[in-house]
Amino acid sequence: MIGGLAGWSKVLEMMPTAMFVRDAMHRWVFVNRMGCEYMGVRADDIVGKSDEELFPPEQAARFAAGDDAVLRTHEVVETEETVTDPQGRVRTLLTRKTCIELEGAPHVLASVTDITELRESEAQIRWLACHDALTGLANRTALFTKLDAAIARAASGAGKATLLYLDLDGFKKVNDTYGHLAGDELLVQFASRLRGLLGPNDTVARIGGDEFAVLVEDDGDLDVEALASNILMLASLPFDVPANASLIGTSIGIAPIGAEAVAAGEMARKADSALYEAKKGRNRYVIYTDELDVALAHRREIEMALRETLRNAAGLDCHYQPLVRARDGEVIGLEALARWRHPRLGDVPPVQFIAVAEETGLIGFLGEWVLRTACARVAPIADIFVAVNVSAVQLRDGRFADTVLRVLEETRLAPRRLELEITETAIVNADDVTVCQLKRLRSEGVRISLDDFGTGYSSLTLLKDLDVDKVKIDRSFVQMAPMADDSAAIVRAVSNLAAALGLSVVAEGVETEQQRAFLREAGCDELQGYLFSAGVPEEGIAGVIGGYPAPLPDYSAG
């Protein structure tokens, strides 16, 4: 053991990290070269001085309290805090303190790592993930996260909300006549007007080129028609751009969110349906009703046909898309994708019949059928797992975990070979029933995958607290990653964070070898997308199991 300061100083001087030693009176007795460089001082400037002489009082008090705790307990203490250094610079520091003995007296040995740039980068990534870069408003992903939360509150009777979809009338003419710079400036100014009109708890989002959305909390005093009229007025005022002489207006579709609301996608469809009706007259608003929704009759037809189909499973099918190990191209799993062909309706898109199933309470029957079919099909295939999507509505059913475990037993599929894919918002907004069921399934060996990950603020802040095994990076980032710095930064950040937490990372929507090479280099563990294979029917599984060594032909241009 090194007992004297001279012995310790030789060791600490060679360390690549800032190292400090303070005595029990909080006086500095040693600082190594890296510490001097970090603080911008010479050792003689601080050795022998106390924290009170070097730092602001509040900061010095925090340092002293941390030292006292280490000296009292002799335990290693690690903290992260924001401090102001002697030059007045604000830094984020990761400090690790331990108690050592020098010449018979206890001292505090501290190592300090400056993680300012790391935390600033993470903050920028979080911002990019949930904001529109042009206007600074929330993006579509952030809107749907808020929308899911609003629906959950409404369902529990904790409050109502209203969703408004907006589309600028005449905007294309501005772009075509005056150029995209004028168009962009108009969008920025309109976004500012919207933000100024709404309260701090309301959400304003840009969801497309000239499409906006507003999610307004309703505490009982909301006059949504007055709000819509004010928005129409704001859009009609001149904009400080070359195109200010142009006639600009907006059309608004309004969808109230009450206790009967079920899914965010359905509320968005209703708002969009009302917007479509509003645009027939332009520069006006329309509130959604079942009578005006031209898709309602079709939805009802789908519901009736789906009920009949679920009685005999005729026309239902599962397609399977391979999940490929990034490092060597081997297929290690299959994702089950529900398909439905009806004799009268034809091929019904999953986005339609799954939304109907969620809204009508049929999702439990449909979900169990898909789970049972997929588990039974994959069970005989060695070394392959199956991934099955699970709706947030299914998770609210207190019998869900029992259903999953019963299906596994009946199909003889080992729990470790089942992966349940659950959306990020479903897990973040999960109630106690859902959390308990997911914990139970994980304890039995079932793996939980977070789908469409990396698109919300909650992703990076809550990931360490979520009970999951895998994260699936949203295809919107994957497809732009090799070309867009912000998407690439998000992919790398998610991969690094997941790796640090011991989680696997899947990238979906892989369509080119360029994307594949980037994702593998960025640290993704598994890849999925049309580059390897689309979803195939049951009889096509044998043809997609195997290897996909790089490089593959790039058909993206064709």
Image (cartoon, helix red, strand yellow):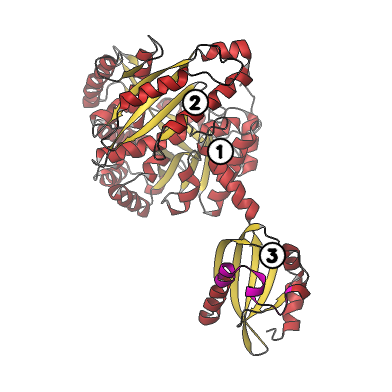
Task: Out of 207 and 439, give the one closest to the viewer.
Answer: 207
Q: Nearer the viewer, mark 1 or mark 3?
A: 3
The residue positioned 47% from the left and 22% from the top of the image is 211
Task: Out of 553 and 82, give the one closest to the viewer.
Answer: 82
Query: Is 52 one of the magenta-colored residues?
Result: yes
Which residue type does callout 1 highlight?
Leu
| Residue picked out by circle 3 | 86
Label 1 CA crowd tier, 10 Å (few <14, some 14–19, many 20+): many
Task: Tell me, yes or no, whether the two marked residues, 1 and 3, touch with CB atoms within 8 Å.
Answer: no
Which residue type does callout 3 highlight?
Pro
Of the numbered discs 3 and 2, the one sitting upstream in the chain is 3
User: Among all residues in the image, which is located at the extreme bottom?
Assistant: 104
Give percent across and percent down for residue 146: 39, 37
Q: Quadrant of the C terminus?
A: top right
Mark carried by residue 534: 2
Segment tinted magenta in the rendering: 46-62
Identify the secondary structure beneath mark 3: loop
| Residue picked out by circle 1 | 128
Give percent across and percent down for residue 42: 78, 70
